[in-house]
Image (spheres, rainbow, N blue to C red):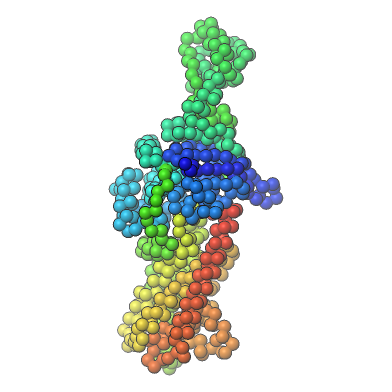
Amino acid sequence: MTAAIDIRGVTRSYVVKGKPDFMALKGIDLTIPRGEVHALLGPNGAGKTTLCRILSTVLLPTSGTVTVLGHEVVRDAEKVKQCLGVVFGGDRGLYNRLSARQNLNFWASLYGLRRGERRRRVDELLDRMGLAQRADERVQGFSRGMKQRLHLARGLVSDPGVLILDEPTVGMDPVAARDFRDLVRELRADGRTILMTTHDMAEAAELSDRVSFIDDGNLALTESPTTVGNIVSTRERVDARGVPQEVRDRLTGLAGVAAVSETEAGVLRVETEHSDATRQVLMTIVAAGVTDVSRSRPSLEEVYLHLIGRRGMAVGGMTALERAPRRRLMPGFGAGFEFQIVAMRGQADTYFSLITAPFFALVFMSIMEYSGRTDLNSHAVIAPMLITMWTAALSFSGEMISEDRENGRLESLIAAPMSFAMLLFGRLSACTLLALPSFLMSYLAAGSVFGYWLSFEKPLLFASALVLTAAATAATATALSAVFVIAPGARIVQNTLSFPVYLLGGVLVPVSQYPGWLEDLTRIVYLSWGADLLRAATTPGAELENTICYLVMLGLLGATAFALGRLFIGRFLQRARALGALAKE
């Protein structure tokens, strides 16, 4: 039967400017059978999280192969994502302005759960994690332990066959940690495969079928907790209280004594290499009249310290069963669209552009009225809508990837089985919806103040042009979002992109009024086609030479922008996975 996880000769190096490459993993070989709970132990910087990131497809190995349920993580990354659940450590990675329920709904939608199934799954997980009573509160008010439980719920939302838990109990109180252990036992009973990294020796011994010790990028040992203890069982220990100093000196010189130390409680601890040495130590201590003596074998924690060494806070370097598909995997657009609608509802700055739209309309109407160009009144009403549409998309495009990266969410998004470009496109498409209420407010402002009520001469053309213009706006913003994250310096000019686009797009003044050379230049801007179509649909007697041609050109420019966006985002993600730059510490 295919192993759940199979790792062969995996290395991972990082380029360090002016220094030799740093090797985070040095030829790791590890096989984890299905249904096993496997603990990965090691000090900070040992390579545990690096290995988890490779398994979850967010980091590329430098060499070697990794398969999850028979799927190779580089070649078959999309298939791996469908059967894998990932929980990265820490309390970051959540959308703090949303509630716990809204967070889980979003992540469930990324895995393609249909609405009814999603609702049942989210309710079940909230109850299972003890978050049901606070499910509709914003996450920003949660304690670190509550956020970690929400992370666990997120990892289980797709009912994965293999679950990776990176420091899952960090920040949990003892009661929550106990409940987590019960949950792991339930998941193991279901036949699920679990790989967890931890520093908690008792937790590893209690939950794991096998443990692996990793240090400085090397796998030191892989065995069951009991077997690991037996490996160093010859190194027994003797604890005694009230041992005279001269006896301590004598014990140090005995053959077979590995170490003599005093614990924090003032107990003398003698570590021996074999049973004969243990017998000599006991005889020496008892002969000195000491009666408070005990003998024991090393615990898993002592094995850990024996194999890894007592490094303390030092950091070594830079820092289930495969289930048949039973859900429709969404490409990301629907999940992103729905999520952004929910997210914008809770942000006050979302509505700023709506407040300014009617004022823009009144200013533009005043210009048209007093300049005697009442034939351009329709422009004055439509322009605020187009300004709002572009401003909203441009603003969000400069923030989305960077915010997810800085807040620890990007890795989990990339590990989900959906198109990240489509997710962005869906979110930015939702942003363009702000144009609809801004248009209504501009329409009412022009009518109530100036008595000009925009007429819809060709409603079907207006609706078609509006949808295509919104899609082209979202597609262009998707391409820009990749540019802003690939070249952070480009964000300096983010706000200055507004007015050139308004000018070249003929938002207020028809491009036909421009000099010939400038009019030709405007045709590479999608808004010039969209604005002409919208005005032709609302201006009595206005006709375009070839309406179909305008619609096709608007659609082609939008499709081209989206294709460029997918290309840029793909290049960014590939480079970030290769360099290990998806997360920002």
Residue 209 position (above or below residue 475): above
Q: Nearer the viewer, residue 101 or 372?
A: 101
Q: Nearer the viewer, residue 194 or 523?
A: 194
Total count of labels: 0
Residue that protrudes farthest toward the front in the picture: 1
Residue 39 position (above or below residue 455): above
- Residue 311, quarter of picture: top right
Residue 390 position (above or below residue 279): below
The residue under the point 45% across, 56% down is 417
The residue under the point 47% across, 81% down is 552
**Residue 464 image point, x, y percent:** 39, 79
**Residue 465 image point, x, y percent:** 41, 80
Q: Taking the image as drawn, is residue 447 in sight? A: yes
**Residue 478 image point, x, y percent:** 50, 67
Q: Taking the image as drawn, is residue 361 in sight? A: no
The residue under the point 44% across, 38% down is 36
Q: Nearer the viewer, residue 368 or 238?
A: 238
Residue 431 position (above or below residue 40): below
The residue under the point 52% across, 35% down is 212
Q: From the viewer's perspective, tell me whether residue 336 is left or right of residue 444.
A: right
